[in-house]
Image (tube, rainbow, N blue to C red):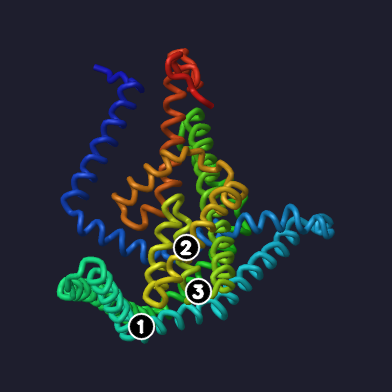
Amino acid sequence: MKFQHNPKYTTIAIYALIVLTLAMVCQYALENLGMVMGFFGKVTGFIVPVIYGVVFAFLLNPLLRTMESRLLPRIGGDQLKPTVRRGVAMILTYLIALICLAVFISIVLPQLLQSLFSILANVPSYIRSITTLYNDISIWINNMLISNAGMDTLGIAEGFSSQIRTTITSMLGALYDLLERSIGAMVTLTTNLTTGVINLILGVIISIYILTDREKLFAQLKKICCALFPKTFYHLLYDIALDVNRIVSGFVIGKVIDSLIIGILCVIGMSILGFPYAVLISVIVGVTNVIPYFGPIIGAIPGFIIIFIVNPLQSVWFLLFVLLLQQLDGNVIGPKILGDTIGLSPLWIIFSIMLFSGLMGVLGMFIGVPLFAIIYSLVKRLVAYLLNRKGESTNTRDYATDSNPLIK
């Protein structure tokens, strides 16, 4: 009997084999999770320079494009050949990045280290000052009670003061231990400095190659996707990639610029108002400002504690200063820089921060918003596709009721 080849059943068999293989691989990975994670950890260690290169290229690409398409043509660079113009733009881009790094290393970093060591050295005096402060408060409360009620409550006041003093002492002791461990971590970091510097240098070199041939790399990636996937799926994948790039680049680059401006304004304002440790606290405020809504609050807490142990009255003024700075950022600076790049309402932004911070900790607070924005975009595309198949409208306003109309 002659065998009749049926492409339909061959395709089904291939898909079944692929699914079975993937299931076996997943089962093996789950049963040997520690070994698999260790393997991926080693692989990640090997490709750290590549990761650095991709990150550097991603961050520097907007500056390079601005140099190449806007700045150079205005000063006569449009007469240059494309390769020469690309080379000049690359030199200017990396020169600006190098200058910014040099400024940070020469100005900001020494002040950060000086502030940290100063706090560590002054912890005992801070403990004595706060203890004296609460002793004075307890005596003042006792005198007030005696003058008003005619009864001696010194014992109560002293007990209250002793409990507060013990709590503050333990908190500052924990801060002292934390700073000591930080110094130990800095020593460990110094021992690994050679490897880190080598990886950074390799990352810079890789980023240069990526930015130099970015059009070719992108075309090659499109070519591979076009060869592997059906045409409809390829176009869908391409549109999704554009959305992901728009969301991530808009949020990350916009937030970096926004946080840099807020950090600079913070250090200028704190210096004018005479707050201590202006550079250290401004760096904290600037970094945490990357987190929408909660960032200014998170950044204000360590700043408040640091200033409080130096001057309790100034800590109150610091909170007012950060509040004004946050209002300036939320109503003026942020909207001008970011616009609506992520396409999420405040409700979903807060939800994404809470969700991913619970799942991934501190890292989730930083990457939760763009990650959720990508998921939101994918779900939005899926809903629109399903509604189009049913012949229904994709406009959300069409699904509002007369009793609950949309306000805007």
Return the residue at label 1.
Answer: 120
What separation in Å lies between label 2 and label 1 (alpha carbons)?
Answer: 22 Å
What separation in Å lies between label 1 and label 3 (alpha carbons)?
Answer: 18 Å
Q: Residues within 10 Å of mark 3 (few under 14, many from 20)?
A: some
Q: Earlier in the sequence, mark 2 or mark 1?
A: 1
Mark 3, secondary structure of its residue? loop
Instruction: Give the x, y percent position of residue 154.
Output: 18, 75
Q: Residue at x 18, y 54 (%)?
A: 32
Q: Is residue 316 left or right of residue 324?
A: left
Task: State the quadrant of the C terminus.
Answer: top right
Return the residue at label 3.
Answer: 275
Q: Residues within 10 Å of mark 1 (few under 14, many from 20)?
A: some
Q: Residue at x 57, y 54 (%)?
A: 328
Q: Amino acid at mark 2?
A: Val
Residue 287 image label: 2
Q: Residue at x 45, y 46 (%)?
A: 370
